[in-house]
Image: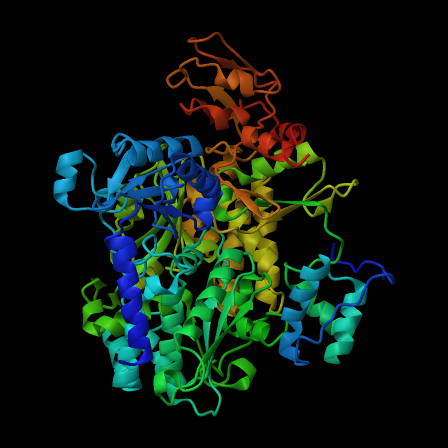
Amino acid sequence: MNKFDSYREEALQKWDSQIVHSELPVIYLGTASCGIAAGALDVLETIQQTLTELGQPARIIQVGCIGPCYLEPIMDIAMPGGPRVSYTNVTPQKAKKILQANLAEGDMASKMAKGHFGDDSFSVRTGIPKFFDLPMLKPQVRVILKNCGFIDPEDGDHYLAQDGYLGFLKVLEAGPGYALEALKESGLRGRGGAGFPAFKKWELARNAQGEQKYVVCNADEGDPGAFMNRALIESDPHAVLEGLLIAGYTVGASQGIIYVRAEYPLAVKRLKKAIAQMRSYGLLGENILGSEFSFDISIKEGAGAFVCGEETALIASLEGKRGMPRPRPPFPSDSGYNGCPTLINNTETFGTVPAIMRNGGEWYQQFGTPGNYGTKTFSLVGKVRNTGLIEVPLGTPLRQVVEEIGGGTELAFKAVQTGGPLGGCLGASQLDTPITYESMRDQGSIMGSGGLIVMDESTCIVDMARYFIGFALRESCGNCTPCRIGTRVLIDRLEKIIRGEGEAHDLDVMRAAADTMVKTSLCGLGQAASNPVSSSLNFFLSEYESHVHDSYCQAGVCKGLFQYVISAERCNGCGVCVKACSSNAIQGKLKELHTLDVNLCTQCHACVEVCTKHAIIGVPLPAETDHLVLSEALQ
Amino acid sequence: MSTLSTPDLAEDLIDLTIFSRQPHQLIPILQYCQSQTGYISRNTVRQIADFLEVSEAHVYGVASFYTQFRFEKPGDHQIRICLGTACHVQGGEILSEEIQKIIGIGPGEISEDNKFEFHEVACLGCCAQAPVVEVDGRIYGKMTRKKLQKVLMGYE
């Protein structure tokens, strides 16, 4: 038995005795960043206190993100011999009650339980559904997220016990040819968004001439509204590291680098820990597991620049320069970091590789559709009821993601932004589009890295376009003129329209600027930066026109282009808005229809925020209003 | 914000010898210096330039490209409002205005008593908990005006 086998054996035994057949109750708590933001650390403190008070020993395992972030904080309890039961939206008070019931009273508090991880008979007995049968989770397939929420990301033994590093062992045994063949057969495409076949990139890097080669993991997740990479690294860092290790061996590199956002301190901390564990297992260093292969991994923290997600800019940043893209060729596979052949893949791409190597390329083809095999993670956020991290097979229709997994929107659905700030806005008529690289492109958007932001009728499309272009403007590195000037032209026109000063030809100017940027910008950022404008002009032209011709913002977002009224149909006279209004503009008795005085209203939005009936709505201004004067007065 | 503060000669020099003198070390060195003193001072720029044998302009040019680096002493409490896409959709900008009302300073500014510093940032990666506010590294999710008042009171 070699050393690694004995580590694995130990890890399996530990998993069995401490988790599967634990004599102690096991308490799981999701403490990835989203859990922490929802208050998981306060819950953790309460768990520790309550255990002391009860005098009951139990094993607390801090796990990563299991997906449905809207249910955070999520606390699970597995009593000895019983399955793991999930309790959601747990507060410290609720945690105490649940623990007391379970540990002291032998009652699993089934009314408070959301789901369990046992078998069908447990559901029948207790009336608690299976966790993965919840509407948000049922249509999902977990390949990349397999371990997320199940293992302690800071305990390497947990990863080993889940067949960790067996993919690498297989490749080490079968040789680089096997890895390339499996990757080719799997059809895996770059999960950063461009969708370039992964095996081609790997093959180019393998065939490139050079003594020194590098493999780089792009974890500079700069898309606002996307957190898939953060969640994966925080919940299962070894999966990404194993992918990097396999890539290093396959292309003949001796050094791996992870370029990770400095804004993700927890991810950085967990990567550092995981790398140290790899070293102790003998998976890093000279002659790994007695082979000829020597490899090491270092972490480089990004310093905050969206454009560094572009591979040549990322390399410039690694070299200690301003992160500005350069023209390709030469491609990084020929001349990358320090002029050496360099393979760059996205975090999710690396995170998928171990499973493909363990199970073979053909296995991966069972997910997705021809040309778009496999699964993809998305961060599903915005106005959907169920927000969180999801994983679905490629080819899944957008509608299923928004309506079934996301649980739909409370107000009428308006659009979904795919592909981050460089993607496009797709409307209700496009919801039946299957999610593939090609179909997203054909619809005028992109797959991107996986941000899905859902908007409802309270979101203004023009304001969203301004938001995205504002982002691109700030993040444009300024190297090439079309992007630097184009984003400025677009934002000026959009702000003009939002102020109510828009003219019909502004829309033509924006179209022309967008077209120029697509055709002439140097890098992917500039070429795609105008996507939000072009796609929204295509699919939501009427909303632009209503701003320009009627000085009316249907969504009630652009100040001075609407006035608030209280809808008689929706108002139930609860009085909450009366209290929220700081300018005494709303009057009304309890249980009677409230009224709003537009002359006192400052459009501060406070009433809209508190009204659960969505009764405060924006309507067009009376024809005689001078909206410019109004707009100025409101500012 | 983007100009270098005047040299503070009393400031201690930072020990850079834990780094190798290679050009690719510039960003890690800048990150290390900022972690030591809270910001990149004129002195620090000079020291790094000497250490790596490059011009001060090069050091400042790289540092000013990245949003992470700052050139002024930080305030006691760091308030950051996320204006990522999800937070924007969920009303992050309205919350930003509210914060500015409460603490009386705009984005990128430090209060006169040096107590608060406020920034609008692109994305904190907690999109499912939008809108989020971060104070001194602690993230508060699903923020409302009411909760905001409470949270900020805790740092008064």
A260 shown above or below A586: below
Which residue is found at the position 58% from the left and 36% from the top? B95
User: Where residue A148 appears, x then y in whole percent?
Assistant: 34, 55
Q: Which quadrant of the figure has residue A160?
A: bottom left
- Residue A421 in sight: yes
Closer to the camera in the image, A86 or A601:
A86
Q: How many numbered discs?
A: 0
- List the single residue furthest toward the front: A55
User: Where residue A102 appears, x then y in whole percent?
Assistant: 29, 35
Asked if residue A460 lies left or right of residue A19, the reply is right
Asked if residue A566 lies left or right of residue A195, the reply is right
Which residue is found at the position 58% from the left and 16% from the top? A585
Which residue is found at the position 20% from the left and 46% from the top? A81
Asked if residue A297 lies left or right of residue B77, the reply is left
In the picture, the quarter occupied by the C terminus of chain B is top right
Q: Which quadrant of the figure has residue A155?
A: bottom left
Which residue is found at the position 48% from the left and 51% from the top? B125
A53 shown above or below A594: below
In the picture, the quarter occupied by the N terminus of chain B is bottom right
Give the colour scheme shown: rainbow
- Residue A619 in sight: no
User: Where residue A69 appears, x then y in whole percent?
Assistant: 38, 44
User: Where residue B80 appears, x then y in whole percent?
Assistant: 61, 45
B43 shown above or below A421: below
